[in-house]
Image: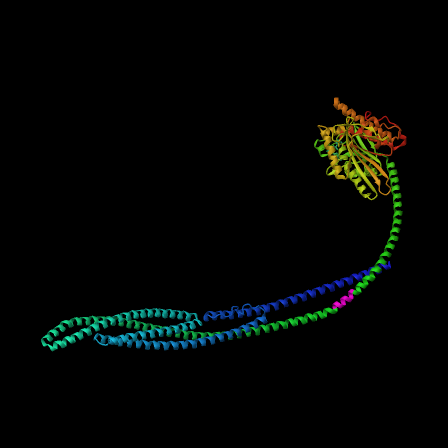
């Protein structure tokens, strides 16, 4: 026991330690989860900051790219095909680096572009100068051409006046040469203009467009010049033809003049003739004059042509003037572009400076905030480390605790096993002691049971194996309604076994085993017979009869009413109660059969065909026992099933007759419960039967003059009740021969009524005066049965019976 106690102590200690370890474990888990959560929140905050920084950088990059795009659209310049800012991954230090690089690259690009722009400007200025020079030379040439035209006009006037034809030819030749020079100058100018166009096409698209326009204009000028040249050639041809004709004419005129001079000379030599010659000359001079007039007209046409050419030259000059104006406009535009470019450059520089400042600020802010966060993180980390440092000794302590616990557990298991062994040994000895004691007890119990049985048997013996009880039926409300309230039966106070009946002025007192007063309850009645009923379980056969005239309460006592059941149900309940109480020691099986005996015919009320007649025969097993072939015997498991069977029997009984009440008063109803028990320890078997019989009415019907079927019924009833009386009388008198075979009822109940069995005769009597005759008969029947038993001296066979009554 001391071992057991110390084991329990150890066990308790171990449990405490385990609980402590569990607590430590849970604390550690909580700390770990808290730390994990803190780390998670810190990580989240850091990620958020990085994200914020990246977004700031991205926005800066976006602004720079936008600026770049603006620049691209303004200058029509192409940056490198891939913008170095966009593909930058959004990682903070690399992004900033790339941003700075891209800004510096952008600045370099811008400087290059500015240089290019200044170069182009210089080129433009030079070209402008060249253009101006060309325009000047053009002017000079045009002036020269004008002078030449004037000179030609003068020459033509001179020609008109008849002299200097060869000079005019020379002039025309000079004009042609000059035209050729002019053409060459124009070609040179065109080439220069083309050069200018190609140069100006490079820096700007607008300049290119303007140059294109200029080029087209120059081309237009070229074509017009070509036309003019062609016209000039044509005019030259005309002029040469005219010259040739003039020469011819002049030659002819010279000839004529010479001829005329000769003629004049001849005439002069002859004066009349001179007059004539003069006249002839005068006659001939109008023709010359006409030819002169024609020549003049031709000269005029030539002059006109020359003037138109002059006009064309004028137009050309105007066009040149226009091109100069265009050039001046272009120069202005270039200047405006330059100023715009300068402005934009300044803006861009400002923007870049601003962005750089912003970037620096953002970077500064981001670095400051990240530093702050890092500081916080560091602080948290130090806190966590501190906590970890505090936790580590706890953990260490826990580990040591755990190892000590483990060692304790290890020790404990050895100790535990030893304790268990000891305990088992102690338990075994205790069990053996207990079993020894219980065996002793069992023996004592069995002895006690035997004694109880013996004493019970003796008690029953003392009371008598056949007991006659009387129950007085109270005056019911129905009786009162009928006005029948006068009674003929009384009992003596203080005595529970005597009853006095009055009939025809005579009073007679009967002494029976027990008299139940009218107010006796079903319970009280049953308690009186309960020991007999229970003896079935010990292997006794018991018969309980309800005897009396119709309406005296037989069925009430046996079956009872649903709210207050009678002997049948109470007996079964008591039997089941007892069987349950003996459940460990005994095993019981219960079978049930219900029969009706009417007019000496047995009918099976649980069978499929209740109308079928059954016979009583000797059992073919050679035991000498009787049995009823074909009688239904149902094995039941409980009260519920028994109730079902009883109601089935009742239904079947009702189907056999037209008037149930009449039938029940003229037939015996027998319920047989067979209980077979097996002792669990010894295996001994017992078999007991409880026969509950609601007998037919004992009234003497034939005395009222009944006839026919009714008389036969009455005779049969009388016969069977007489036979029952005789059998009981024989049994009480312990006669050698018991006339069981005299009726179907006694024959059927032979093995239950025989020696060693127990019988209760419950005589039901009415208190009413009108039933006094029948009451007297019933009480005489009861009295005689009792008398037979009560004293051996009275053990004589009386000639008593129903017929005698
Ligand atoms: P029997 O079966 O002898 O013909 P019953 O048992 O049918 O008579 O009884 C007749 C009537 O009297 C029934 O209504 C029954 O309820 C009633 N009765 C019988 N005995 C008692 C009693 N002790 N207390 C109350 N009523 C009773
Ligand atoms: Mg009845």
Q: As displayed, is residue 458 above or below residue 360?
A: above
Which of 476/285 is in front? 285
The type of colouring in the image is rainbow
Image point (70%, 71%), residue name: 386
Residue 632: horizontal and vertical position, in percent? 77, 32
Q: Which residue occupies the foreground of this view, 47 or 373?
A: 47
The percent coordinates of residue 469 (x first, y second) are 81, 34
- Residue 770 seen: no
Q: Residue furthest right?
A: 793
The span shown in magenta is 394-402
Residue at horizontal 11 percent and vertical 75 percent from the top:
274
Q: In this rendered view, identify the residue nearer to me: 472 or 281.
A: 281
Above or below 429: residue 566: above
Snapshot quadrant of residue 791: top right
- Residue 343 versus residue 401: which sits nearer the camera? 343
Residue at coordinates 18% horizontally, 73% vertically from top-left?
256
Ligand 1 appears in which quadrant? top right
Tell me: residue 426, above or below residue 283. above
Q: Position of residue 134 (x, y in %)?
A: 36, 76
Q: Is residue 629 visible?
A: yes
Furthest residue in direction top, as rendered: 708
Q: Residue furthest left?
A: 272
Q: Position of residue 660 (x, y in %)?
A: 72, 30
Predominant SS of the magenta segment: helix
Location of the N terminus by quadrant is bottom right
Q: Seen in the image, is 658 located left or right of residue 780? A: left
Whether 736 is among the magenta residues is no
Question: Is-magenta flag for residue 397?
Answer: yes
The C terminus lies in which quarter of the figure?
Answer: top right
């Amino acid at each position: 026991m001391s071992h057991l106690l110390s084991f329990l102590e150890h066990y308790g200690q171990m449990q405490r330690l385990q609980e402590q370890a569990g607590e430590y474990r849970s604390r550690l888990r909580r700390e770990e989860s808290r730390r994990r959560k803190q780390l998670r929140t810190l990580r989240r905050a850091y990620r958020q900051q990085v994200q914020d920084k990246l977004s700031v950088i991205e926005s800066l990059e976006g602004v720079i790219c936008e600026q770049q795009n603006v620049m691209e659209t303004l200058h029509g310049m192409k940056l490198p095909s891939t913008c170095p800012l966009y593909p930058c991954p959004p990682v903070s230090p690399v992004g900033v680096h790339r941003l700075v690089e891209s800004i510096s690259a952008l600045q370099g690009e811008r400087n290059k572009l500015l240089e290019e722009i200044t170069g182009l400007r210089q080129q433009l200025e030079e070209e402008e100068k060249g253009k101006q020079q060309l325009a000047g030379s053009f002017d000079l040439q045009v002036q020269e051409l004008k002078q030449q035209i004037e000179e030609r006009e003068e020459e033509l006037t001179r020609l008109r006046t008849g002299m200097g034809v060869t000079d005019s030819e020379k002039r025309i030749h000079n004009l042609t040469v000059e035209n050729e020079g002019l053409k060459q100058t124009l070609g040179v100018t065109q080439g220069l203009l083309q050069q200018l166009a190609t140069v100006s096409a490079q820096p700007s698209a607008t300049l290119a467009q303007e140059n294109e326009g200029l080029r087209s204009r120059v081309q237009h000028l070229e074509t017009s010049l070509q036309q003019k040249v062609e016209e000039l050639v044509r005019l030259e041809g005309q002029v040469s033809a005219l010259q040739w004709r003039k020469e011819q004419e002049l030659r002819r005129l010279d000839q004529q003049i010479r001829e005329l001079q000769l003629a004049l000379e001849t005439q002069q030599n002859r004066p009349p003739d001179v007059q004539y010659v003069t006249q002839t000359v005068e006659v001939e001079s109008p023709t010359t004059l006409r030819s002169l007039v024609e020549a003049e007209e031709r000269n005029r046409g030539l002059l006109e042509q020359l003037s138109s050419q002059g006009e064309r030259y004028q137009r050309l000059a105007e066009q040149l003037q226009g091109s100069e104006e265009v050039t001046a406009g272009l120069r202005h535009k270039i200047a405006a572009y330059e100023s715009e470019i300068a402005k934009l450059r300044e803006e861009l520089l400002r923007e870049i400076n601003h962005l750089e400042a912003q970037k620096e600020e953002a970077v500064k802010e981001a670095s400051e905030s990240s530093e702050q966060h890092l500081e916080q993180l560091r602080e948290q980390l130090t806190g966590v480390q501190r906590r970890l440092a505090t936790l580590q000794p706890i953990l260490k302590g826990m580990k040591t605790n755990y190892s000590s616990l483990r060692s304790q557990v290890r020790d404990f298991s050895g100790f535990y096993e030893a304790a268990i062994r000891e305990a088992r040994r102690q338990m075994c000895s205790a069990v053996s002691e207990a079993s020894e004691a219980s065996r002793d007890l069992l023996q004592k119990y069995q002895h006690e049971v035997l004694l109880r049985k013996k004493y019970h048997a003796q008690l029953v013996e003392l009371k008598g194996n056949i007991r006659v009880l009387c129950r007085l039926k109270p005056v019911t409300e129905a009786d009162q309604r009928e006005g029948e309230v006068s009674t003929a039966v009384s009992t003596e106070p203080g005595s529970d076994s005597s009853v006095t009946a009055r009939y025809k002025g005579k009073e007679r007192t009967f002494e029976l085993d027990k008299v139940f007063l009218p107010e006796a309850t079903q319970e009280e009645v049953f308690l009186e017979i309960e020991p007999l009923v229970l003896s079935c379980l010990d292997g006794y056969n018991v018969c309980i009869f309800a005897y009396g005239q119709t309406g005296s309460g037989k069925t009430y006592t046996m079956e009872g009413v649903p709210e207050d059941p009678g002997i049948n149900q109470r007996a079964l309940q008591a039997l089941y109660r007892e069987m349950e109480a003996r459940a460990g020691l005994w095993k019981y099986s219960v079978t049930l059969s219900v029969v009706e005996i009417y007019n000496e015919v047995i009918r099976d009320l649980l069978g499929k065909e209740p109308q079928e007649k059954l016979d009583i025969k000797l059992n073919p097993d050679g035991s000498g026992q009787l049995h009823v072939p074909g009688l239904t015997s149902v094995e039941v498991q409980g009260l519920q099933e028994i109730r079902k069977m009883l109601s089935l029997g009742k239904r079947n009984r009702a189907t056999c007759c037209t008037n149930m009440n009449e039938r029940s008063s003229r037939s015996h109803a027998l319920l047989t419960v067979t209980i077979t028990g097996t002792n669990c320890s010894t295996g001994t078997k017992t078999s007991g039967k409880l026969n509950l019989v609601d007998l037919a009415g004992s009234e003497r019907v034939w005395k009222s003059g009944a006839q026919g079927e009714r008389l036969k019924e009455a005779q049969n009833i009388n016969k069977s009740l007489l036979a029952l009386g005789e059998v009981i009388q024989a049994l009480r008198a312990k006669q050698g021969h018991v006339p069981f075979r005299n009726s179907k009822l006694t024959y059927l109940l032979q093995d239950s009524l025989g020696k060693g069995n127990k019988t209760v005769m419950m005589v039901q009597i009415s208190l009413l005066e009108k039933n006094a005759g029948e009451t007297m008969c019933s009480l005489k029947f009861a009295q005689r049965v009792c008398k037979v038993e009560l004293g051996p001296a009275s053990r004589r066979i009386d000639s008593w019976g129903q017929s005698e009554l």
